[in-house]
Image (spheres, grey):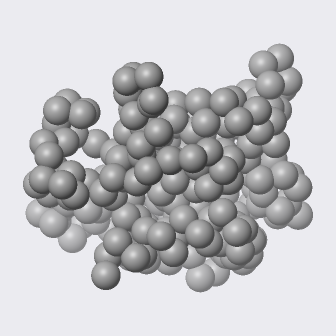
Amino acid sequence: MKLYFSPGVCSLSSHIILQETGIEHDLIQVDLPTHRTADGGDFYQINPKGSVPVLALENGLVLTEGVAIMQFLADKAERYDLLPPVHDMKRYQVLEWLNYIGTELHKSFYPLFNLTLSPNDRELFIALLNKKFAWLNEQLKNKSFLLGDSFCLADAYLFTVSNWCDVVGVSLSELDHLQQYRGRVRQRPAVSKALSIEASYNK
């Protein structure tokens, strides 16, 4: 398998799950501003949508969208701790969290990466994210991870998205439960390895 990624962006969550499952893979870096791969190839030829992550399978098929990629990897590895099996209610709770993170958090960051956004609009979007992270902070009270004691796909996604807070000016300093949660996720060997590998690409 090949994972097309860019350091620090949403593809990190798929990279974390690759490390968690131990599935053999190659990493192909994509320069998002130019949409060129590390070897100079046209990334649009791989994914016409132009976004990472992309998982190229051994059989020639290509899978896009991080949430779909993470589910595929967990099912392939039969890692039911990451994504419980069909008909287990906890599976749908994981999917519930994945949908919330994707639609309510991930998409809410996009305007803040727009350098032409007005100061007033920036304040509005930051206030919106502050409210959502404050709610998340309460959900993590007395829990190690989103589902309780077990790390799942949604934790990889939330950790990835929450890392953007420092970049755009969203403060999590007063959200103790969320801060402790992020520390626990960061300490996982697979997460630490994925972060280290991606940092090496930025050197």
- Residue 59: horizontal and vertical position, in percent? 44, 22
- So how many labels did they put on this image? 0
Residue at 64% across, 80% down: 174
Residue at 59% across, 69% down: 193
Give 97 or 64, whichever is nearer the viewer: 64
Q: Is residue 110 visible?
A: yes
Give 97 or 54, whichever is nearer the viewer: 54
Residue at 85% across, 60% down: 143
Seen as rendered, the residue at the extreme top is 87
In the image, taking residue 167 as reference, residue 87 lies left or right, namely right
In the displayed structure, 56 sits above or below 161; it is above
Give 1 or 11, whichever is nearer the viewer: 1
Quarter occupied by residue 184: bottom right
- Residue 116: horizontal and vertical position, in percent? 12, 63
Q: Quadrant of the C terminus?
A: bottom left
Give 70 or 169, whichever is nearer the viewer: 70
Q: Is residue 154 visible?
A: no
In the image, taking residue 52 as reference, residue 79 lies left or right, namely right
In the displayed structure, 146 sits above or below 63; it is below
Residue at 84% across, 52% down: 150
In the displayed structure, 78 sits above or below 22; it is above
- Residue 42: horizontal and vertical position, in percent? 13, 42
- Residue 144: horizontal and vertical position, in percent? 83, 62
In the displayed structure, 168 sits above or below 100; it is below
